Image (cartoon, rainbow, N blue to C red):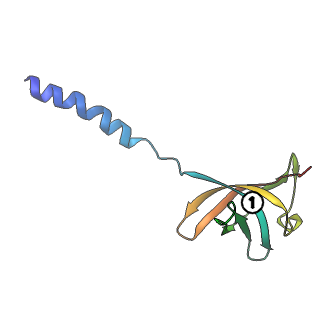
Amino acid sequence: MRRPAAALILLVPLSLHSARPQQPATYVYQGTIETVRPRAGSVALVTGVGMALRLVNIQTTATTRVASGTTPLALTALKPGDVIRAECHRTDKGPVADRIERIQLP
């Protein structure tokens, strides 16, 4: 009688843990815009340091929020050379931006 009760005590927390909905992982990219393609809804971002630079193609959707500080922007307001911070989630087709913030340089 003790073994089934002990097994039940161990298995119930595991089943409750797996029943929780998993939140998609958020990835944050920060770098310099190489190209902006408003019609395609994408931004090519150069990120990294020194010899470890890489190009990340970030897709946008109609719900992607683009801003500079507290001022909302259109995707067309972003230009090559702008420094941005993009909060993205991963999909099969690559990162999709939930929020893009243009960083004001001093």
Find the residue positioned furthest to the right.
106
| One can see residue 26 in this view | yes
Find the residue positioned furthest to the top.
2
As drawn, 94 above or below 85:
below
* Residue 33 spot, x, y in % from top left: 79, 66
Residue at 89% in and 64% down = 77
Query: Within the image, what quadrant is residue 29 found in?
Result: bottom right
The N terminus sits in image quarter:
top left
> Could you tell whether 5 is left or right of 98 in the image?
left
> Could you tell whether 71 is left or right of 18 in the image?
right
* Residue 44 spot, x, y in % from top left: 73, 70
As drawn, 8 above or below 85:
above
* Residue 16 spot, x, y in % from top left: 35, 36
Q: Is the residue marked by circle 1 packed among few (<14), some (14-19), or many (20+) residues within 10 Å? A: many
| One can see residue 60 in this view | no
Query: Within the image, what quadrant is residue 20 found in?
Result: top left
Residue at 87% in and 58% down = 73
- The amino acid sitting under disc 1 is Gly
Residue at 17% in and 26% down = 6
Q: Secondary structure at mark 1?
A: strand
Q: Which residue is mark 1?
A: 31
As drawn, 93 above or below 48:
below
* Residue 91 spot, x, y in % from top left: 55, 64
As drawn, 31 above or below 9:
below
Number of numbered discs visible in the structure rendering: 1
